[in-house]
Image: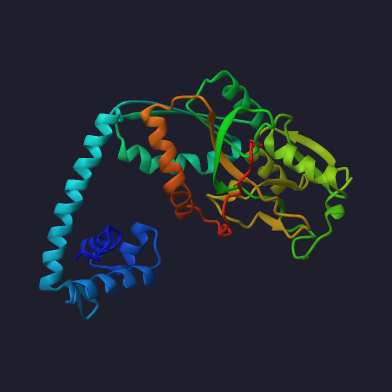
Amino acid sequence: MQNATLHQLKVFEAVARHSSFTRAAEELFLTQPTVSMQVKQLSKTVGLPLFEQVGKRLYLTAAGKELYSTCRDVFERLDQFQISVADLKGLKQGTLRLAVVTTAKYVIPRILGPFCQRYPGIDVSLTVTNHQYVLDSLADNRDDLYILSQLPDDSDAHCEPFMENPLVVLAPRTHPLAHEKNIPISRICEEPFIMREPGSGTRKAVQKLFDAHGLPLKVKLDLGSNEAIKQAIAGGMGLSVLSKHTLALEGLNNQLTILDVEGFPIERSWYVVHPSGKQLSAIAKAFYDYLMNEGKQVAEATSLLGMEQQQPQKVEV
Ligand code: PGA
């Protein structure tokens, strides 16, 4: 068993518990072929089959039963170890303070779910606000961690990207441009445009792109909320540019569509940020590590959107 990995044992344990490759794949956010491959390799290492299929049902073999009970012991011991370590690190209780930009509210609460289950004694204070206000909180050291898509040039902050946050052009599904390909960016300036409020990072990124092309937008409305902008687009008030993640829960329903415009999506990433010299609490450090290691996977598993498989973009600060 020296060659068996903990990951293979985890996959095997989930298949055995559910008596199903499909349900194990769903639970672990893996594809079914990956799960089958891991079990196949494990059974090769053991030297005996671990499952047998009778009709539609999957049964553990004698070797499978032995391994299943061993896995349960191993994982129980590991869970106990994790709790002991958490206690030692002071993760049993306390508050995690997060300040995030409005686009991040579409993923951070979903990422927080499994984290809070892992550390049930922890309370979370989550402030959702725009880019400028998050920068103000960072400058005042009001929170533990900050989530931003754009960083101040002069900030003495430690920052690390954890997930892509592309900005796309949204229109009503019935819009005449809805089925066009490679729409010139100048064409967007002929349409009424709905813009986020001053201080918004989304607004900054949109303005930067159109300014770089020397193109003025016909801004008809300023709105301080992504949700209100989506409603205004659906109501035919104009086009807008928002994070693709603003569609995470409903996906592309029958009201809105993403236009295929030259220069889009605007590729951006979310960064987890804290002042360089700040000593993170055990809770903040645990959340930071969790976000970097598992955040993207958890967010994507619960989103209705197909996000491109890209690496978050690194910047030097
Ligand atoms: P905003 O920031 O909420 O200030 O628009 C979002 C972002 O920059 O992704």
Indicate the quadrant of ligand 1 in the picture.
top right
Give the residue displayed 49% in from the left and 40% down from the top: 108
Q: Is residue 279 left or right of residue 194?
A: left
Residue 197 image offset from top left, x and y in percent: 72, 32
The correct choice, above or below, for 104 with respect to 31 in the image is above
Q: Residue at x 66, y 54 (%)?
A: 255
Quick check: can you spot residue 235?
A: no
Colour pattern: rainbow
User: Front-most of 198 and 190?
Assistant: 198
Rendered image quadrant of residue 315:
top right
Image x and y of residue 75, in percent: 20, 51
**Which residue extends farthest bottom?**
55
Q: Is residue 7 above or below residue 47?
A: above
In the displayed structure, does residue 239 sit left or right of residue 191? left
- The picture quadrant where one finds residue 308 is bottom right
| Residue 144, image x, y percentages | 47, 27
- Residue 310 location in percent, x, y? 58, 57
Q: Which of the pair 284/226 is nearer the observer?
A: 284
Q: Point out the residue furthest to the top here.
A: 140
